[in-house]
Amino acid sequence: MLIKIRHQAKLKGFSLYKLAKEMKLPQQTVYSWASARTQPGYENMERLCQVLDCEIGDLLEKNGNELAIPLLTQEEYDSGLKNEQKRMENIRERAKSLGLDLESCLISTDTISV
């Protein structure tokens, strides 16, 4: 996915470092998104929009008059969000079984594998 994190952050006066701190994510995660090595999940895309006060469309790279990536249908978006929520629930359950309290920890859903 081609997203314009660096551009939107600059418009808001944020460095990528400041954006990562604002989102309570590792700096490496945001830099990885900005360089297109990895992609933010649905929840993080929504958080990006909240922090940068923009719409998802503002983050998408455009190629001429067309988006460089196809837009998701509402059904695809809802399905992806449901999968992200299920994945997070699995992480919470796994952490609970290990006696960890994730609510008191800062975690990045992009770097955890269970």
Image (cartoon, grey):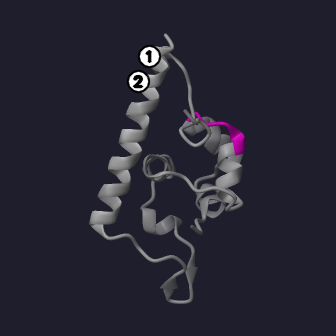
Q: Is residue 3 left or right of residue 102?
A: right
Residue that appears at 64% across and 63% down: 7
Residue that appears at 38% across and 55% down: 80
The residue to which callout 1 is attached is 96
Magenta stretch: give its range. Answer: 24-28
The quarter of the picture where the C terminus appears is top right
Circle 2: residue type: Glu
**Residue 86 placement (x, y as % from top left):** 36, 40
Residue 34 or residue 11, whichever sits in front? 34
> Relative to residue 62, is residue 103 depicted above or below?
above
Q: Is residue 15 visible?
A: no
The residue to which callout 2 is attached is 93
**Residue 29 placement (x, y as % from top left):** 66, 45
Q: Residues within 10 Å of mark 1 (few under 14, many from 20)?
A: few
Contact flag, marks 2 and 1 (Cβ < 8 Å): yes
Secondary structure that dominates the magenta span: loop
Residue 43 or residue 98, whichever sits in front? 98
Residue 2 or residue 7, whichever sits in front? 2
Residue that appears at 49% across and 16% down: 104
Q: Indicate the secondary structure of the residue bearing disc 2.
A: helix
